[in-house]
């Protein structure tokens, strides 16, 4: 199988390359920096330097591919237009190049649960639920999905929720760092319900989406079925390190004020951050949970890491890597 991976130097994309190479796929990685991607070349991946707005690079990257795994995305941007440029327009450029190549048999888009929007407590999201994104990021991911749905290639769309695991620099590592201090804040009162997926499980799911029969033109949520509250997640992270932690709830008005301030500082510094007033619309929802049973049934995929084993694996990796 010949496969193109975008976002291969990132958290999820890097793990996907490893899974594809382990099963013997011929992998091409679209990378912005050949130097930063040298480790992928050492693993046998072919490197094509460029980005999602470089049509020449996209044509070279998609030529001869059996499947395109689109993992790259913009997770922090200064405004809604920047999110759309990355997550909608970049997706459209890649899809157009893949269609023109005449080879790609399937286009796998790694979207986000943010595109579907929050769930209700006690009622995980289903693939056929109406989408209701509540942030500019979520709306841009949904716009990318719409592009793929309207294209000419067979497609599979995956919506993971919180992703954690080895090499995570942006998500739960912040909680690990705070938990080491014995106190960690959560947005709201700590009762928000969450689904999560270990990055290795997600990478295996993405790889399966490229090959499993009878998945064409379907959308799936991909996560471990376990549901946990935000407060319990913090406690479980502390337990994985052999520590205890005091969970500090941040009431909605206080949380919004903090996020408004961090967003304003970032704008002054001309930096992009996910910690802004818009993101409060995600952080303060009652639940972000999803039902993965459809993908489990159709693809034969089962998450290997529950939260206890996944958090312990992540902690071991952080210690060995010297990140904590």
Image (cartoon, rainbow, N blue to C red):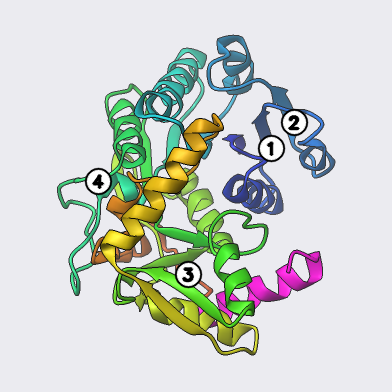
Q: Is residue 156 left or right of residue 23?
A: left
Dot label at residue 154:
none
The picture places residue 98, in percent across and down from the top left corner, at 49, 21
Task: Tell me which numbered mark, 2 or 1, is placed earlier along the sequence.
Answer: 1
How busy is the neighbourhood of tag 2: few (under 14 within 10 Å), some, or many (20 plus)? some
Residue designated by label 3 = 303
Which contiguous range is marked in magenta?
A: 306-324
Q: Residue at horizontal 55%, vertical 34%? A: 271
Neighbourhood count class around disc 1 (C-alpha, 10 Å): few under 14, some 14–19, many 20 upward: some
* Labelled pair 4, 1 in contact (Cβ < 8 Å): no
Q: Nearer the viewer, residue 230 or 199?
A: 230
Distance from Cα at disc 3 to Cα at disc 1: 25 Å
Check contact, mark 4 vs mark 2: CB within 8 A.
no
Gap between marks 3 and 2 measured at Cα: 29 Å
Q: Which residue is mark 2?
A: 46
- In 3D space, how far apart are the residues under numbered discs 2 and 1 (Cα atoms)? 8 Å
The 10 Å Cα crowd at callout 3, few under 14, some 14 to 19, many 20 or more, is some
């Amino acid at each position: 199988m010949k496969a193109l991976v975008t976002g291969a130097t990132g958290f999820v994309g890097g793990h996907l390359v490893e899974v594809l190479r382990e099963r013997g796929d011929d992998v091409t990685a679209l990378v912005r920096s050949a130097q930063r991607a040298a480790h992928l070349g050492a693993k046998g991946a072919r490197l094509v330097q460029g980005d999602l707005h470089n049509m020449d690079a996209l044509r070279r990257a998609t030529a001869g591919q059996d499947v395109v795994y689109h993992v790259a995305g913009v997770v922090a941007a200064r405004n809604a237009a920047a999110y759309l440029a990355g997550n909608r327009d970049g997706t459209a450029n890649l899809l157009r190049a893949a269609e023109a190549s005449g080879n790609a048999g399937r286009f796998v888009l790694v979207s986000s649960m943010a595109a579907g929007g929050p769930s209700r407590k006690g009622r995980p999201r289903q693939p056929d639920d109406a989408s209701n994104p509540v942030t500019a990021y979520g709306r841009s991911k949904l716009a990318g999905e719409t592009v793929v749905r309207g294209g000419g290639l067979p497609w599979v769309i995956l919506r993971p929720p919180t992703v954690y695991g080895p090499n995570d620099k942006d998500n739960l590592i912040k909680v690990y760092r705070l938990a080491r201090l014995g106190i960690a804040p959560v947005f709201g009162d700590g009762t928000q319900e969450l689904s999560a997926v270990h990055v290795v499980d997600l990478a295996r799911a993405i790889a399966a989406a490229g090959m499993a029969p009878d998945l064409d033109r379907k959308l799936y949520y991909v996560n471990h079925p376990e549901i946990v509250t935000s407060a319990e997640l913090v406690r479980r992270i502390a337990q994985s390190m052999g520590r205890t932690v005091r969970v500090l709830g941040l009431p909605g008005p206080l949380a919004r004020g903090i996020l408004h301030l961090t967003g304003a500082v970032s704008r002054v510094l001309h930096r992009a951050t996910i910690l802004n007033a818009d993101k409060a619309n995600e952080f303060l929802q009652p639940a972000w949970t999803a039902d993965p049973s459809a993908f489990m049934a159709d693809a034969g995929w089962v998450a290997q890491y529950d939260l206890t084993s996944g958090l312990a694996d992540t902690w071991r990796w952080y210690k060995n890597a010297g990140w904590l």
